[in-house]
Amino acid sequence: MACGGAAIGGCGRGPDPGGTAAPGRASLTAGKGKGEVYVGKDADPVTALRSALAAAGGLEFIRPGSRVVLKPNAAWSRTPAQAANTDPRLLSAMIELCREAGAGKITIFEHTIDRPAAQVLAVSGIAAAARQGGAELIYAATERDFAPIEVPRGRMMKRDTLARAVLEADVFINMPKAKHHSQTQLTLGLKNLMGVNFNRQAWHSSPDLAQYIADYASAVAVDLTVMDASRILVTNGPKGPGKTREPGEVIVSFDPVAADAYACGLFDLEPSAVPYIGKAADLGLGEGSSSNIVVRRA
């Protein structure tokens, strides 16, 4: 699915869109595994993923015929070795695992920043992973692919937009890349949700980007976070190129805040160094204190 360049850049209406706003979708796994993260570690990221998922109890929440949306971080025209995007091997494996769990239609959604979008997804390997897995790929989405939503728990944001594919999904799995970010210190799972918003550029001129990230996460229910920390970008993020490190980990959690808080340690940081984590915890979205997180290593 292709579109014009303006949509690729996330231009258009700001964070208070017109039209009738709908509530966000509900999570299938709300309240499950608060403060728990499951970590697989292996030189092969697919092996690490399978181990972590097995430790978390698998994908039993996917009902037969479910519409599943996977959201990788694939905004940049970078190769997998440059660690700016989710490893396509993990995306391929998740497509396969979702099918094994009984999923019906599987959609990969990304709102690229670099352009042209087709080139970005080719260079990153995401397009090939979707194609080989028989998944629908929605990218460089146009404004009509987003719907206004309410953000009732938001402290600064009360309305914004959400990709219709996510709003209508039975299951939404967030697949962020753990990496450095020049403005927010790190890009992790909560920030990866900016990619299902139409005009994320408006957030960068907001009084408090971290609060916007947390507010938005309160309205976008994530059923599972699967974070790629097999190879991480530790400098010059979010795009790079920069220095990389290889923890060899895949982090799985039903608690999106705990997943992000744990990942901070891979960068020798405390969660308090990434303000949106604490703000999300304050909204009751999960556990943001590393001392309260239970890490189960597969």
Image: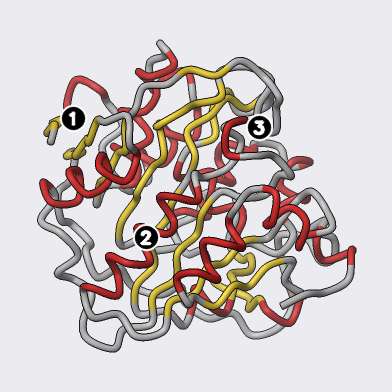
Q: Residue furthest right?
A: 5
What's under tag 2, amino acid-wise? Val
Would you call the spot at circle 1 few (<14 residues within 10 Å), some (14-19), or many (20 or more)?
Answer: some
In depth, the one of 265 and 53 nearer the eye is 53
Question: In which image quadrant can residue 209 be found?
Answer: top right
Tell me the residue at 56%/24% (across/down). Answer: 233
Q: Earlier in the sequence, mark 3 or mark 2?
A: 2
Q: CA distance from mark 3 to mark 2?
A: 22 Å
Would you call the spot at circle 3 few (<14 residues within 10 Å), some (14-19), or many (20 or more)?
Answer: many
In depth, the one of 19 and 145 nearer the eye is 145
Would you call the spot at circle 2 few (<14 residues within 10 Å), some (14-19), or many (20 or more)?
Answer: many
Closer mark to the observer between disc 3 and disc 2: 3
Q: Secondary structure at mark 1?
A: loop
Above or below, 99 against 123 in this view is below
Tell me the residue at 22%/35% (across/down). Answer: 39
Above or below, 269 against 205 in this view is above
Q: CA distance from mark 1 to mark 2?
A: 19 Å
Q: Earlier in the sequence, mark 1 or mark 2?
A: 2
What's under tag 1, amino acid-wise? Ile
Q: Which residue is mark 3?
A: 238
Q: Position of residue 290 (x, y in %)?
A: 25, 23
Q: Which residue is mark 2?
A: 222
Asked if marks 3 and 2 touch (Cβ < 8 Å), the reply is no
Q: CA distance from mark 1 to mark 3?
A: 26 Å
Above or below, 2 against 268 in this view is below
Q: Is residue 112 left or right of residue 194?
A: right
Q: Which residue is mark 1?
A: 293
Q: Earlier in the sequence, mark 1 or mark 3?
A: 3
